[in-house]
Image (cartoon, rainbow, N blue to C red):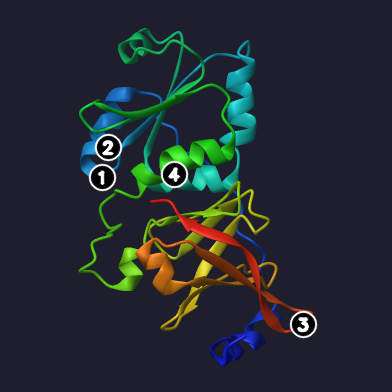
């Protein structure tokens, strides 16, 4: 491996503080308030139409997919989340035919996207990430710096994993064999470096190919061999 990685080797032996606890989704229970907040903040609305305890798919979605820290963090940071029950007379306005249903709406109530059923975390993340990435402050124009262009980036890891940026210094992964939450640690002219505070994991994302959207590889520092190794295929989705 090239010597440009060597000065990062010692960093992987540091033991950091405990990992951040799971983020809760700050659900709003009333749609009018949600649309007012969407207009104020510039964030799209994520509307969950769900059933009561009788609805097994609804319970599964909330207990498994929405309870995942990577999913809840994405929703909390990128959307105005509102949840209504099927007993709410307003749910017919959205043309919902199956419970549960998640709808992405703009501040005027115009539908942007939707998904129905007890979807898994990767499916929901792939649906939501491009819409969250279009928020103010997550800039992708080529005229901005490399750091800005990667804000809100979404990558496929291997065949089923996902890695994405929340618009700041935090990165999240799902089904990629990686820690669920990573932070941007450093970068040089070639690589973006991500780390996990709890496990001393250090990753390298090839910067030039990531910016161009080209297929590449994710690199991981091996503590035993003290060298970098190719961890998985990397493909930018956004």
Alpha carbon separation for disc pair 3 and 4: 39 Å
Q: Earlier in the sequence, mark 1 or mark 4?
A: 1
Residue tagged 2: 37
Alpha carbon separation for disc pair 1 and 4: 13 Å
Residue 231 locus on image (x, y percent):
65, 66
Residue tagged 1: 41
Dot in front, 4 or 2: 4
Quarter of the image holding residue 18? bottom right
Residue at (57%, 86%) from the top-left corner?
5
Which of 149 and 180 lies nearest the eye of the viewer? 149
SS at badge 3: loop
Mark 2 Cα shell of 10 Å, populated few (<14), some (14-19), many (≥20): some
Residue 131 locus on image (x, y percent):
34, 42
Mark 3 in CB contact with mark 1 (< 8 angstroms): no
Residue 149 locus on image (x, y percent):
32, 65
In the depicted structure, whether residue 117 falls above or below residue 76: above
Mark 1 in CB contact with mark 2 (< 8 angstroms): yes
Alpha carbon separation for disc pair 4 and 2: 13 Å
Mark 1 in CB contact with mark 4 (< 8 angstroms): no
SS at badge 4: helix
In the depicted structure, whether residue 63 falls above or below residue 175: above
Mark 3 in CB contact with mark 2 (< 8 angstroms): no
Q: Earlier in the sequence, mark 3 or mark 1?
A: 1
Q: Earlier in the sequence, mark 4 or mark 2?
A: 2
Dot in front, 3 or 4: 3
Dot in front, 3 or 1: 3
SS at badge 1: helix
Residue at (37%, 40%) from the top-left corner?
79
Residue tagged 4: 76
């Amino acid at each position: 491996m090239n010597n440009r990685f060597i000065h990062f080797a010692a960093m992987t032996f540091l033991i950091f503080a405990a990992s951040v606890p799971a983020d809760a989704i700050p659900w709003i229970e009333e749609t009018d308030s949600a649309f007012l907040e969407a207009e104020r903040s510039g964030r799209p609305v994520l509307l969950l139409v769900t059933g009561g305890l009788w609805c097994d798919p609804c319970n599964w979605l909330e207990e498994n997919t929405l309870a995942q820290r990577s999913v809840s963090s994405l929703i909390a940071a990128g959307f105005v989340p509102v949840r209504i029950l099927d007993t709410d007379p307003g749910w017919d306005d959205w043309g919902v035919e199956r419970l549960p249903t998640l709808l992405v709406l703009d501040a005027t109530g115009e539908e942007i996207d939707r998904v129905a059923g007890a979807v898994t975390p990767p499916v929901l993340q792939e649906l939501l990430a491009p819409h969250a990435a279009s928020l103010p402050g997550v800039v992708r124009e080529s005229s901005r710096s490399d750091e800005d262009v990667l804000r809100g980036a979404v990558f496929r890891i291997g065949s089923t994993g996902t890695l994405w940026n929340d618009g700041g210094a935090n990165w999240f992964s799902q089904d990629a064999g990686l820690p669920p939450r990573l932070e941007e640690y450093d970068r040089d002219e070639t690589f973006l470096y991500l780390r996990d505070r709890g496990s001393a994991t250090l990753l390298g994302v090839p910067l030039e190919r990531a910016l161009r959207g080209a297929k590449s590889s994710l690199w991981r520092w091996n503590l035993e061999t003290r060298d970098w190794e190719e961890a998985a295929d990397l493909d930018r989705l956004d």
